[in-house]
Image (cartoon, rainbow, N blue to C red):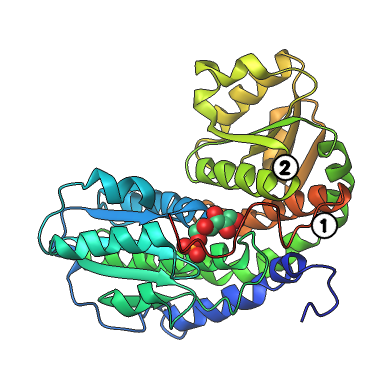
Amino acid sequence: DKGNHRHFMAKEIHEQPEVVGRTLAHYVDMANGRIALPEALPFDFAKLSRLSITACGTAFYAGLVAKYWFETIARLPVEIDVASETRYREPPLERDGLTLVISQSGETADTLASLRYAKAQGQHSLAVVNVPTSTIARECSVVMPTLAGPEIGVASTKAFSCQLTVLLCLAIAAGRARGTLDAARERALVDALITVPGLMAESVKLEAEVEVLSREIAKARDVLYLGRGTSYPMALEGALKLKEISYIHAEGYAAGELKHGPIALIDETVPVIVIAPHDAIFEKTVSNMQEVAARGGRIVLIGDAKGAADHGLDTLATLTMPDVDPVVAPIVYAVPVQLLAYHTAVFMGKDVDQPRNLAKSVTVE
Ligand code: F6R
């Protein structure tokens, strides 16, 4: 049932404040401002020397964001790869180490094969999955569910934001176990998490603006997405979302990589979407925006009021997001990134819920 929406994808984007809120309620002890995981862990975060993450597609990008969180919040080194590589690379994995797999469907063949490989190496396994009855959920030693509800649109949206939510809760729990964050910092992070559903609801209000912008994006043959820090995986996710449903060629890059190649592509025909909340590295991203502007590139800034006031450049559009704590920014910024892909594809008359050549669940490699 699509409710009042034209497509499942639209419904699922709009549902995010609710399902992220529901997921949070499952992981957060609201009264005490701390994380309370729904299940005991069969391993100790404090004893891990590293964490291995593996997943495919959008779930992999959620894992890439989580790498920043686990490393900064819990000082836990993270190794991450796409599951199709993990399974054949056969990386050395320590006995009693931890492999984290992320999957909406819980049936993705490569992710499942990587999980089985990790278990055979004597690793503990933790799954962040949306389908609790899935094969991956059954085979993992512990499951941390996303409570996104059934996701019908082939392009993952609400499952992604719920994955991010669970992963941040896990990183905070890991930080507590490893003694890298005190109660006050945990409370501050939990306070930031609690603001997320409301901020996502506010971000949905940018939809009319995004729709106007999407008509411009629809004319492009190539689109570049740039971001730094946790906005880098968001750039990858933005490019994936756009290409899979609109069939416009899109690439995501770490903003700092611009001069190492992709800058050669910049001209007035290639929109450059810059994902940049006003965080500690915002100024670095501004210098990349200047490089784009100097070559006649047309910039779309997805940022906040502070950033928009600071950069002083002409943009094709600026989507002014609400102020967010930079730690939780990827969850909130998922909304405009998804809306832009959605409206561009709808404007182009594409079948957004059933894009060509794609399946919701990739059960063969
Ligand atoms: C993109 C998308 C895919 C999936 C990938 C993994 O929008 O939906 O990239 O994220 O196929 O699927 P799951 O999460 O079911 O393992």
Q: Nearer the viewer, mark 1 or mark 2?
A: 2
Asked whether 352 or 272 is in front, the reply is 352
Q: With 331 as the anchor, is 123 left or right in this view? A: left
Kindly identify the residue that appears in the image at 64 percent across and 59 percent down: 155
**Residue pushed farthest front?**
364
| As drawn, 101 above or below 265 | below
Dividing the image into 4 quarters, which one contains the N terminus?
A: bottom right
Which amino acid lies under the numbered mark 1 shown in the image of this protein?
Answer: Glu
Question: Considering only order in the chain, which callout, 2 or 1, is on the residue closer to the N terminus?
Answer: 1
Asked whether 140 or 67 is in front, the reply is 140
Give coordinates of residue 187: x percent, y percent: 41, 70
Give coordinates of residue 323: x percent, y percent: 65, 54
Which secondary structure, mark 1?
helix
Q: Which residue is mark 2?
A: 247
Which amino acid lies under the numbered mark 2 shown in the image of this protein?
Answer: Tyr
Dividing the image into 4 quarters, which one contains the C terminus?
A: bottom left
Q: Quadrant of residue 283?
A: top right
Q: Evaluate whether residue 261 shows in this view.
A: yes
Q: Which residue is mark 1?
A: 207
Q: With 146 as the anchor, is 54 left or right in this view? A: left
